[in-house]
Amino acid sequence: MTLIVTAYCACKICCGPHAAGITASGIPPVQGTTIAASRSIPFGTRLSVGGQVFTVQDRLAKRHDSRVDIYMRSHADAKAFGKRRLTVQKL
């Protein structure tokens, strides 16, 4: 399927005023591994996004359930990634 793919970091701009640097699954996010997805996709599910494999470890706001959000270490990297339409496949 083709979805909108965005990126985020653990800052208050990306995650809100109560950002604590921990994913919804309770573990720290890791660049190149962590992806946020809708609640309909269980934690631990592996997703191929544009050919790169990520693990669902975080959640999106319900209003963004039709996309995925890749974790980046810095806000600058997340902002540079922008918003893309990419092929996303459950593995």
Image (tube, rainbow, N blue to C red):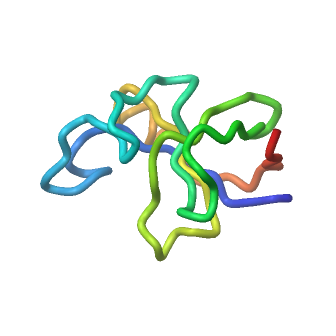
- Residue under the point 51% across and 48% down: 36
Task: Residue 51: give x, y in percent of width and height.
Answer: 82, 31
The number of discs equals 0
Q: Is residue 70 left or right of residue 11?
A: right
Foreground of the two, 53 or 75: 53
Q: Is residue 33 above or below residue 36?
A: above
Q: Is residue 29 above or below residue 79?
A: above
Q: Is residue 25 above or below residue 1?
A: above
Quarter of the figure with the N terminus: bottom right
Foreground of the two, 73 or 83: 73
Q: Is residue 57 left or right of residue 84?
A: left
- Residue under the point 33% across and 37% down: 26
Q: Is residue 63 left or right of residue 56?
A: left
Location of residue 40 by image quarter: bottom right
Task: Residue 3: give x, y in percent of width and height.
Answer: 73, 60
Q: Is residue 73 above or below residue 90?
A: above
Foreground of the two, 79 or 28: 28
- Residue under the point 57% across and 69% down: 65
Task: Residue 16: give x, y in percent of width and height.
Answer: 22, 56
- Residue farthest bottom in this picture: 63
